[in-house]
Amino acid sequence: MIDSVGSAGGGLLTAVMKNATASQDVAFAVLKKGQDVEKANGEAALTLISAAAATSPGRIDVHV
């Protein structure tokens, strides 16, 4: 079907495909950044829990 499109239409099709690819790249980068932030938050929480466990062996107090 792409072969049936003339050269002017082919340029438009290429531009549309590049735009779609760029949009997907942005969406992927945002998703990846979100995953990186979640991973960093999880690691920070584990570090905090480990530090709290080291100061009071055997229990972690939770204040609500």
Image (spheres, grey):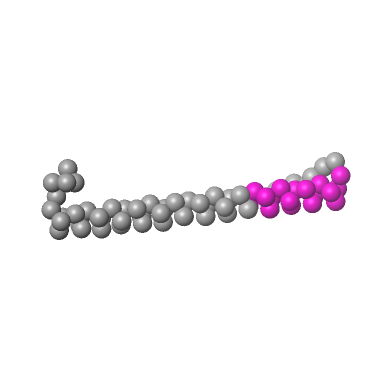
- The spot of residue 2 in percent (x, y) is 19, 46
Q: Residue at x 67, y 50 (%)?
A: 43
Can you say which quadrant of the picture contains the N terminus? top left
Span of residues in magenta: 41-57
Work out whether residue 11 or residue 51 is closer to the camera in this orientation and state it: 11
Q: Which residue is drawn at 79% across and 51% down?
A: 51
Q: Residue furthest top?
A: 58
Q: Can residue 63 be seen in this view?
A: no
Q: Is the magenta stretch mostly helix, strand or loop?
A: helix
- Does the magenta segment cover residue 53? yes
Work out whether residue 59 or residue 47 is closer to the camera in this orientation and state it: 47
> Is 38 displayed left or right of 43 in the figure?
left
Number of labelled discs? 0
Among the 4 quarters of the image, the one containing residue 7: bottom left
Q: Residue at x 22, y 53 (%)?
A: 13
> Is 17 displayed left or right of 32 in the figure?
left
